[in-house]
C-alpha cells in the first residue's frame, strides 16, 4: 500500500526508525526528581482540568505554571478547582492566567516545559504546531483534528517534534492501561492466532449540552457547546468513538483502507444539539481483508455497550481483561489509573528516551473521520480519498460573530470533498 507522501508503508516505518535512531537526546531533560516541571494548560474545560490534576499526580516535580482559555469564567472555575486540589502545586497567579484567542501563545511564552492541549479538537492542529515550534513537550487530548487537513498538519508537526527530540503523548489512554497493554502484547505474540475480525462499540445515552444564552454570538455559543458542531468536535464518531477504533487499529497494527457506513440524527434533533448525528454503524476494512464492525450511539434510553472485541483463528479477546481459546488468559493484578499513567510515561520519556504518539493517534483520528465521511455521503470511502480530502471544516480565522449552523449531512446528497 502506498502512503500518502509517495512512500510505501514499509518505507515509512523504515524511514521513521532511521530518524529515531539518529535522534539527539530529548529536549528539556529534567534532573531526576530534583527539578520543577512546569506544566501549562491550554483549554480549561472538564477534561483539561482533569488532565492537569493527572499530570500532578503522575510526578511530584510537576507544578501547574500557567493556564489559558478562551473564556474568563471557564479559566476561573478550573483554576479554583485546581488550587483546592493541588494546593501549593497550582502556581498560577493572575500574571500567568490568560484569556482570549491568543491565550495559548501566552501560555507557551510563560516558561512552561510541558503543555497540555485540551481545547476543543478543531483547535488542536494549530495549537500543536505552535507548541512544537516553541520547543515544548506535549500531552494532547484526542481526537487531534476534525478533518483531513488537520490530520495532515498534526502528522507534519509530529515529524517536526521527532526531529527536535520533543515528546508527544495522546489522550488515547487505553494505550497506557496495563491490562490493555498486556492483552495487546499477547495478541501481537499470536495468542489469538491470526486476527480475522474486530468489533468496536461506544453506545450510550446523551452527553452534556449548553443552551444558548442571550448576548452570545453564534461562535461563542458553538464553542461553549462544542460537542455538537463538526468544525469543533468532528462528530461523536470522531470525538468519542475514536477510543474503540484506536484499539482495533492497535490490534491490527494498521489502519483500514476503506469504510462504508450508516448514520443519522433520529432522536437528538433539537437545534441545541447543532447538526451532528446521534448514531453511526460502520464497516471498516483493512488491507488484508479483515473487517472492523463499528457502532456508536448517543441516545437516552437505549442499550449501553462500550468496548472492543478481537476475534482470531485460535481465540477471542476483549482486548484488555481476558483471552479465550488455546492460550486462555485473564488479567490479574493492580490496574493503576491510565489517565495518570499517560502523564507518567510522558515525563519518563522526557527524562530518558523520547516518545511520539502523534502519527498513531492521527491515523486513528483519520479512521474515524473516514467513517464519518462514509456516513455523511452514503458512499464507500477509501483511505486515499479521505486522507487526501481538501474539505477544511475549521476556519482560517476564528473570532466572535455570526456563524450559521451547518446543514445536517444527507446521505446520497452530501458530496465527498
Image: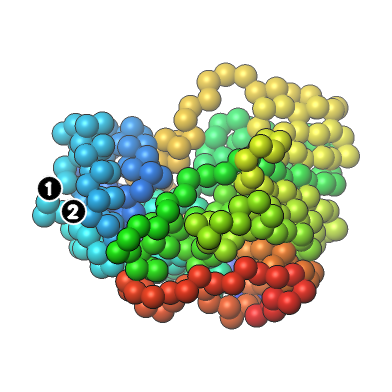
Residue extending furthest right? Answer: 313
Residue projecting furthest to the front? 214
Q: Can residue 253 be seen in this view?
A: no
Query: Which residue is pictured at 39% across the width and 75% down the height?
Result: 402
**Image: 173 above or below 178:** below
What residue does disc 2 label? 97
Residue appearing at x 22%, y 47% in the figure: 76
Q: Quadrant of residue 103?
A: bottom left
Return the x and y of residue 252 as percentages of the image width and height.
Answer: 73, 50
Task: Please tell me whether residue 12 is drawn above or below residue 291 in the rendered image.
Answer: below
Seen at 71% across and 45% down, the residue is 200
* Residue furthest out toward the top: 333
Which residue is labeled 1 in the image?
93
Q: How many residues crowd mark 2 within 10 Å: few (<14), some (14–19), many (20+)?
A: many
Q: In this view, does 6 lie to the left or right of 190?
A: left
Q: For numbered disc 2, what is the local secondary structure?
A: strand
Q: Residue at x 36, y 48 (%)?
A: 45
Left or right placement of residue 327 versus residue 174 in this view: right
Residue 392, how many percent across, how many down?
53, 77
The answer to the question of whether label 2 and label 1 lie on touching residues, with beta carbons closer than 8 A, is yes
Amino acid at each position: 500500500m502506498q502512503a500518502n507522501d509517495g512512500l510505501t508503508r514499509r518505507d515509512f516505518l523504515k524511514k521513521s526508525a532511521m530518524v529515531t535512531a539518529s535522534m539527539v537526546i530529548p529536549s528539556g531533560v529534567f534532573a531526576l526528581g530534583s527539578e520543577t516541571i512546569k506544566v501549562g494548560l491550554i483549554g480549561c474545560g472538564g477534561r483539561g482540568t482533569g488532565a492537569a490534576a493527572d499530570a500532578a499526580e503522575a510526578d511530584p516535580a510537576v507544578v501547574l505554571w500557567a493556564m489559558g482559555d478562551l473564556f474568563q469564567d471557564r479559566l476561573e472555575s478550573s483554576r479554583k478547582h485546581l488550587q483546592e486540589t493541588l494546593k501549593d502545586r497550582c502556581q498560577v497567579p493572575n500574571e500567568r492566567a490568560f484569556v482570549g484567542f491568543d491565550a495559548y501563545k501566552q501560555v507557551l511564552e510563560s516558561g512552561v516545559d510541558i503543555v497540555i492541549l485540551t481545547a476543543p479538537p478543531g483547535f488542536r492542529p494549530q495549537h500543536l504546531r505552535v507548541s512544537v515550534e516553541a520547543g515544548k513537550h506535549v500531552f494532547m487530548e484526542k481526537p487531534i483534528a476534525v478533518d483531513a487537513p488537520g490530520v495532515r498538519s498534526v502528522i507534519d508537526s509530529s515529524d517536526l517534534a521527532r526531529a527536535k527530540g520533543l515528546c508527544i503523548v495522546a489522550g488515547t489512554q487505553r494505550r497506557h492501561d496495563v491490562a490493555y497493554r498486556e492483552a495487546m502484547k499477547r495478541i501481537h505474540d499470536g495468542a489469538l492466532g491470526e486476527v480475522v475480525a474486530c468489533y468496536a462499540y461506544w453506545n450510550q445515552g446523551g452527553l452534556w449540552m449548553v443552551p444558548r444564552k442571550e448576548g452570545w454570538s453564534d461562535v461563542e455559543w458553538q464553542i461553549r457547546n462544542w460537542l455538537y458542531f463538526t468544525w469543533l468536535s468532528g462528530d461523536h464518531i470522531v470525538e468519542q468513538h475514536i477510543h474503540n477504533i484506536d484499539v482495533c487499529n492497535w490490534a491490527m497494527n494498521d489502519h483500514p483502507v476503506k469504510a462504508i457506513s450508516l448514520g443519522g440524527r433520529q432522536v437528538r434533533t433539537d437545534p441545541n444539539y447543532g447538526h451532528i448525528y446521534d448514531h453511526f454503524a460502520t464497516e471498516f476494512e483493512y488491507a488484508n481483508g479483515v473487517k472492523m464492525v463499528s457502532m456508536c450511539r448517543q441516545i437516552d434510553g437505549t442499550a449501553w455497550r462500550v468496548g472492543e472485541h478481537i476475534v482470531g483463528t485460535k481465540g477471542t479477546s476483549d482486548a484488555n481483561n481476558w483471552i479465550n481459546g488455546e492460550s486462555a488468559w485473564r488479567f490479574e493484578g493492580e490496574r493503576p489509573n491510565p489517565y495518570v499513567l499517560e502523564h507518567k510515561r510522558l515525563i519518563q520519556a522526557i527524562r530518558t528516551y523520547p516518545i511520539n504518539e502523534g502519527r498513531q493517534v492521527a491515523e486513528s483520528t483519520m479512521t474515524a473521520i473516514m467513517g464519518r465521511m462514509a456516513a455523511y455521503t452514503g458512499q464507500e470511502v477509501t483511505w486515499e480519498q479521505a486522507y487526501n480530502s481538501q474539505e477544511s471544516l475549521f476556519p482560517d480565522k476564528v473570532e466572535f460573530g455570526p456563524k450559521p449552523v451547518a446543514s445536517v449531512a444527507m446521505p446520497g446528497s452530501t458530496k465527498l470533498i
